Image (cartoon, rainbow, N blue to C red):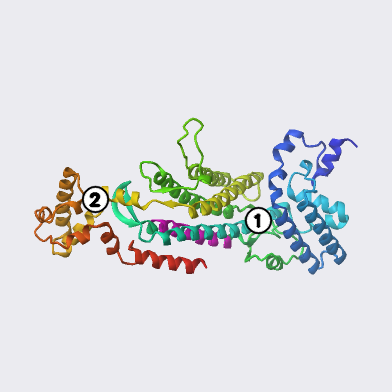
């Protein structure tokens, strides 16, 4: 028998075909060299399926024991790097099944009773992704805690708050960092919600219509720790909502990382000079010896586009597919795998990088002073003296105009100069016009006052414990 004939006989459908698959098509359609990462899930799902078949009297006890023994050997071979992944066998499922049959004989062939690769792969991807989501949840917690630590240390550090990238009002640097903690907390909530829909069992749907064997799908779901069974066989094998939904949640995490990256890049620039990043997260220039470039946040900002692109790719992949399974769905894995890898690597490195931020409070405070950040405080002061806010706004605008012309901060204007804008202004106005006074005044839930920052830090620590 020729090599091509041998290769063709290894295919699960070989008896139907009169010629072997061409080498070009074999390479084009194979997925084993990227889907082999599903091997643990494939073995776990197969063992649960075999246990159920035995319990239902579909699989003999000796065959079940042989399958367990064979899978244990395969697990050992893969972990030791001795397992031979074969392109001729196309994917992770056929590679493992073929090796199982080599080890235990006919029992290996009986394992596939009552299932198809269609429901098998859907189960494997869900099992694998469930584990990845659990790791991502831990990484999101680590990043939040790193930011909380820096926030606590900077509850009283004054930072110019911006709108439209113009100095607006003073805020605590710790308050600013806690805004990102809120974002990543929502990301963790979304991941937990996605996990519930990932954690549903397609196995038993077979190719598309279910099976005539008396399977106990609920038993398999319990064995695998899944929360529910997919209720429609057509949907079970063709649905990739869970992958799209995960990718959407991952894209949002990366959007938040990208926003933080943009601020770290700005803050580290000479024009701002608010922070410094540890050298191990930066690079130099091949031509300019003075350069220290924030490569990690820049690259993370770029990788956010990559993850968003994968989301768009998955949505496009699914939009034109009729029910049920189509080979198109093989293309779900590489973008999903890369999304997971990119997100995990990014979260891991950002937690470490955030913990090593060096804060430059003097530069932050100088910048806040340059932007007339307490102008709104002066308006609020006048409102408390009885002036309608719109009128107070106009009065303060004139005062700021004068201060700009004189090149001074509002707090540097004399009391007489300030009273010229409105007679209600008294000596206590200087408490209002100070950056520290402005910060302390916003002592309400969600505000930037140091006491509020510390309260939020305590809340986050309790939540993340």
> What is the span of residues highlighted in magenta in the rendered image?
176-196
Q: Residue at x 39, y 68 (%)?
A: 455
Callout 2: 10 Å neighbours few (<14), some, many (20+)? many
Q: Which mark is residue 136?
A: none
Residue toward you, 344 or 145: 145
Residue farthest along the right direction in this orientation: 1
Which residue appears at 39% of the width and 66% of the height?
Answer: 454
State which tag comes first along the sequence, 2 or 1.
1
Residues 49 and 83: in front is 83
Was residue 184 drawn as part of the magenta stretch in this picture?
A: yes
Q: Position of residue 400 (x, y in %)?
A: 18, 49
Foreground tag (2 vs 1): 2
Q: Which residue is painted at 22% across and 54% down in the image?
A: 375
Q: Most prominent secondary structure in the magenta stretch?
A: helix
> Which quadrant, please, contains the N terminus?
top right
Total count of labels: 2
Q: Residue 305, percent across and down?
A: 50, 43
Q: Position of residue 174 (x, y in %)?
A: 39, 58
Q: Quadrant of residue 229?
A: bottom right
Asked if the magenta segment contains residue 433, the reply would be no
Report helix, strand or loop for mark 1: helix
Residue tagged by mark 1? 128
Real-space Cα distance between discs 2 and 1? 53 Å
Q: Nearer the viewer, residue 219 or 383?
A: 383
Question: From the viewer's perspective, is 123 left or right of 69?
Answer: left
* Residue denoted by label 2: 372
Task: Bin the neighbour count of mark 1 within 10 Å (Cα to Cα): few under 14, some 14-19, many 20 and up.
Answer: some
Q: Secondary structure at mark 2?
A: loop
């Amino acid at each position: 028998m020729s090599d091509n004939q041998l290769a063709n006989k290894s295919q699960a459908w070989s008896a139907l075909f009169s010629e072997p698959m061409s080498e070009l098509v074999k390479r084009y359609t194979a997925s084993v060299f990227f889907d082999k990462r599903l091997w643990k899930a494939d073995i776990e799902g197969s063992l649960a399926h075999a246990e159920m078949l035995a319990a239902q009297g579909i699989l003999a006890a000796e065959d079940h024991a042989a399958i367990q023994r064979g899978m244990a050997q395969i697990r050992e071979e893969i972990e030791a790097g001795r397992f031979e992944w074969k392109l001729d066998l196309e994917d992770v499922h056929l590679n493992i099944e073929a090796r199982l049959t080599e080890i235990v004989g006919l029992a290996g062939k009986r394992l596939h009773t009552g299932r198809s690769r269609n429901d098998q792969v859907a189960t494997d991807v869900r099992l694998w992704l469930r584990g990845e989501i659990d790791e991502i949840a831990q990484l999101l917690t680590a990043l939040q805690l790193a930011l909380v630590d820096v926030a606590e240390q900077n509850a009283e550090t004054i930072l110019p708050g911006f709108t439209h990238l113009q100095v607006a009002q003073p805020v605590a640097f710790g308050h600013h960092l806690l805004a990102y903690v809120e974002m990543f907390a929502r990301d963790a909530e979304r991941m937990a919600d996605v996990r519930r829909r990932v954690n549903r069992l397609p196995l038993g749907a077979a190719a598309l219509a279910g099976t005539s064997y008396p399977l106990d799908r609920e038993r398999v779901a319990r064995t695998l720790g899944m929360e529910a069974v997919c209720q429609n066989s057509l949907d079970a094998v063709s649905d990739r909502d869970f992958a799209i939904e995960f990718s959407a949640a991952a894209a949002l995490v990366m959007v938040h990382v990208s926003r933080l990256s943009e601020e770290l890049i700005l803050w580290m620039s000479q024009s701002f000079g608010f922070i410094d990043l540890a050298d191990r997260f930066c690079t130099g220039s091949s031509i300019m010896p003075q350069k220290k470039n924030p490569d990690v946040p820049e690259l993370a900002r770029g990788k956010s586009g990559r993850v968003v692109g994968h989301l768009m790719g998955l949505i496009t992949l699914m939009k034109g597919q009729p029910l049920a399974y189509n080979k198109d769905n093989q293309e779900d894995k590489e973008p999903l795998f890369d999304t997971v890898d990119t997100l995990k690597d990014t979260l891991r490195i950002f937690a470490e990088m955030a913990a090593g931020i060096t804060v430059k409070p003097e530069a932050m405070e100088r910048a806040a002073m340059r932007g007339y950040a307490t102008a709104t405080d002066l308006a609020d002061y006048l409102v408390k003296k009885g002036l309608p806010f719109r009128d107070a706004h106009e009065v303060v605008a004139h005062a700021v105009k004068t201060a700009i012309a004189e090149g001074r901060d509002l707090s540097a204007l004399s009391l007489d100069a300030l009273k010229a804008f409105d007679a209600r202004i008294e000596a206590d106005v200087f408490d209002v016009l100070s950056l520290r006074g402005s910060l302390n005044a916003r002592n309400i839930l969600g505000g930037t006052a140091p006491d509020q920052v510390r309260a939020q830090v305590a809340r986050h620590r309790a939540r993340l414990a």
